Every structure is written in C-alpha cells, then in structure tokens.
Image: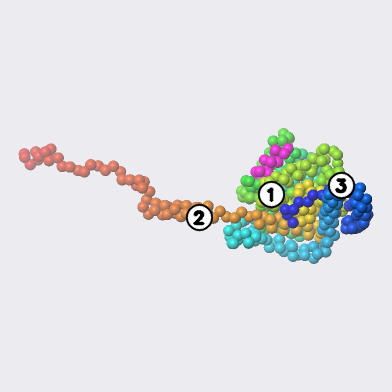
Amino acid sequence: MGGDSYCFSLPTTEDLSLSGKDSPHESINSSGDEEGLRHKLENGSVMKDVTWIDEAEAAERQRLKVYSQILRSYEDIQPRVDRLEEAKNKILSYTPGSWADKAACTELSEYDRPNATSLLLIGPKGSGKSSLVNKISRVLEDRVFLPGRAQVSSSSSAGDGTFFLHEYMIPRGSGSFCVYDTRSLSLDSSENLKMIKRWMTKGVRHGELIRRKSDSMTLKAQLKCKARRSFFSGQVRPVDFVIFVVNGLSVLESMNSADEKKKGYSEMIAANFNNPLLSFKDDKPAIAVTHGDLLPLPDRVRVCAYLGQLLGVPPTGQIFDIPENNDPATTSTIFDMLIYCLERADRNLPVKDLFAEKVRAVAGLLFWIAAAMIVVFGIPGLHRSKPQAPPFKMEWHKIRHLWLE
Ligand SMILES: Nc1nc2c(ncn2[C@@H]2O[C@H](COP(=O)(O)OP(=O)(O)OP(=O)(O)O)[C@@H](O)[C@H]2O)c(=O)[nH]1
Ligand SMILES: [Mg+2]
C-alpha cells in the first residue's frame, strides 16, 4: 500500500468479461499463449526478439495479476463484513495524533497535533463530493433513513453545486475529525493551482465562499446574494489529508472515447492529482470512485486499474470504490478509506519546532518580568516630578529698613 506504481497495458473488455473467464489465473496458466510462445522460440523464428517477448510476457502477467488483485478485493467481502464493527469502533475512538508513528518521535507530545484532523474532499464538478459526505455520515452516525447533511446537486446548471467550504464533524458533534466539502475543480488549470495553493498552505475555513474570475456575471450575482447570509466559524484549519473524488462513469467514458472533451476528464484528474501540494511527503491523496452502482463489475475493475496506472498508485488499497449503495461492502470500503486517511494524516503530522517554542517561552518570561517591574517600580519617566520652584532665598537688603527705622 502506498508508494508503488504499476505499469501495464489495460485489460481489454474480453479480459474483464467475468462470464468468459472466471479466473484471471486461468488465462495466465492456460497453456495457449505459452504454447505459442514456446513454439515460436523452438522454431527460432523470433530468437532475435527473445528479450522483447520476455518483457511482453512479463507485462501481460503483471497486467492480469493486478486485474486479479482488484477482482479479489471485490470478491473477498466476508472477512471485511465480519470486522465492520471493529473498524467502526476504531474510527469512533480516533483522536488527532493517536495513530501517529511513535517510532519517529519519542513522545506523542512532540507532534504538533490539530484540535481536529481535517480531510479535504477535492474533485471535478458533480463527482460526488457532497454525496460522499452523506455516505460517510450515514455509516458512522447510523443515519440510513435520515436526509443527508450535505447539499447534493441534482442538475449540472451553473448555479448548482457547492460554492462555500463546509466543515462536517464526523460523527456530528464530535471533535476528532472533520471532512471539508469544497467547490469543484475548475476547467481552468490556473484557477485550480491558485485554489489548491490557498487551501493547502493557508488552511480552510468553514463558510468561506470560493469565487473565481471565470464565474459568469449571473453566477457572481447569485453567489453574492447567497454569501449575504453566510457565516464563518472563525477557525482556520490546516488540511491534514486529501481525498480525491472522481466519477467512475466519466472515467470510463474518457478511457473509451476519442472525443477530446471526454478524454479531458482523465487529463484534468491526473494534472490536479499530481499537484505536489496535495501530497504529504510521499503520501498521495486517497481516491474515492463514485457512481460504481451504474457500472457492471468488469467496468469498475477496469476503472480502478486505469486510475492506478494513470495516477501511479496501487489500484487496491489507495483507490476506494464507493457507489451509492447501502450494503456492507460499501460500508466497509468507506471505513477502509477513513482509516487509510487518518493513519496518513497522523503519520505526517509536523513535529513541534522545539527551538521556536523555547524562544517563545523565554520571550514570554521576559515579558512577565518586565510587566512585574513596571507594576512595582512604575514606568521610568511616567511619574517624573513637576519642575519645582527655586528654593526660597531671603533678600535681607530689601527688608533691612524694618529694623533700621
Ligand atoms: N448513481 C450515483 N449517483 C451519484 C453518486 N455520487 C453522486 N451521485 C449523484 O451525482 C450528482 C452530483 O453529486 P454531488 O454529490 O452533488 O457532487 P459534487 O461533487 O458535490 O458536485 P459539486 O458540488 O457541483 O462539485 C447528484 O445527482 C448525486 O446524486 C453515486 O455514487 N452513484
Ligand atoms: Mg458538492
């Protein structure tokens, strides 16, 4: 998990046709390809290309191995379902820094721990960020039949969607971690760079309106109107980890399409995902794939394999397929994603700058000593005595007449 990157050609639809081949291992082990290869080698017809054949064969094996791993992650549901309560309790007992790696720092107190760990949701328009907030709340707050907390957009009109940063404490009322719902990525990459830089370097604040130069006049007027009643929590939080949300359906379309606009979806994901500001040391964001409920399983597997290759992350373990389903497998995937993010947030916590802390402590001490001295001795010069009258001097010659007369 984390760090490794995979390079292989994508499985074709036939490869992924589950009815056609039950197990990818069969296709590796089925002697057809190997027989052909051995035959060619024995004939000497491709002796010059032996190295190339070995590489191609290795790539094919790698490709099918990855496919098999992804498929297995969907099939091995039972052990995950069995530990649902355990995973839920683990998340509910989380406190910021409690999962930090003690080996890196002798004392937990040496980490600069936030009051609440913030996970930032980021992704293209309509990718399902607000819906993901509701899915997370639903599984941790047992709110299956209650309305979602975040406003989901039902149309793709320009005025719909999330425009204000919104903090959701998970679960509601707790203070351990929160997810931040954000405005979607723009089609203008320079606006994304600016927006990401601001969030990742200056932090995020509940209620903040995200404006863009490219917004139409109508949208600007609408947002101004909405912002009138907006409120700020006042607390700016640093971002502790990022969840990149993508629409699996749009990814599939961009994979299959020759249409530049559709292909642009994947390019946009890759460009923003690889922004180094979104990574924490070597840890790249987690990826949440939505809309899987609208796709057959082979296509979901293809999407995960494709994203793994496109973004240079392992397709199992860092890519989380979270469809709009209320089943134990989806709940388990949401828990896995949260555990993944909170663990990475904690292990990347900054260590306190002890020197700066000492300097601050000494400066504070000096301040209080100075304050105490002022109270005791007063501010020098503040109570300076008024100019005094010159000392009285008797002028005897002027009153001499008093005793001479
Ligand atoms: N079928 C299905 N629909 C989904 C899923 N996730 C989101 N949607 C739908 O996609 C649409 C957009 O979802 P939102 O959650 O508002 O997306 P968003 O990323 O917050 O959108 P913006 O705030 O505009 O950026 C809504 O109609 C959702 O119901 C999913 O996993 N499956
Ligand atoms: Mg939204």
Image location (x, y in percent) of residue 326: 82, 57
Residue range (magenta):
188-199
The 10 Å Cα crowd at callout 3, few under 14, some 14 to 19, many 20 or more, is few
Residue under pointer 2: 358
| Furthest-top residue in this view | 217
The mark found on residue 264 in the picture is: none
Let me know if residue 325 is in the magenta part: no
Which residue is at 50% across, 55% downward? Answer: 358
Question: Where residue 348 sits in the image (x, y, percent)?
Answer: 65, 54
**Which mark sits nearer the N-terminus, 3 or 2?**
3
Q: Of helix, strand and loop, which one carries label 1?
A: loop
Front in this rendered view, residue 123 or 38: 38
Q: Residue at x 84, y 48 (%)?
A: 52
Protein image colouring: rainbow
| Of the pair 257 and 202, the residue shown nearer to us | 257
Q: Give the image location of residue 281, x and y in percent.
A: 66, 51
Of mark 2 and mark 1, the one earlier in the sequence is 1
Residue 195 lies in the magenta stretch = yes
Q: Three-letter amino acid code at disc 1? A: Ser
Say which residue appears at 70% left-offset and 52% top-offset.
283
The amino acid on which the numbered mark 3 sits, given as a three-letter code, is: Lys
Q: Residue at x 78, y 45 (%)?
A: 126
Element at label 2: helix
Relative horizontal placement of residue 234, taking residue 212 as reference (left or right) = left
Give the labeled residue for mark 3: 48
Q: Residue 213: percent from the left, percent from the top?
A: 69, 36
Does residue 136 appear anywhere in the picture?
no
- Residue 279 shows which numbered tag? 1
C-alpha gap between disc 2 and disc 1 = 30 Å
Q: Main secondary structure of the magenta part?
A: helix
Distance between mark 1 and mark 3 Cα atoms: 44 Å
Query: Residues at badges 1 and 3 in contact (C-beta under 8 Å)?
Result: no
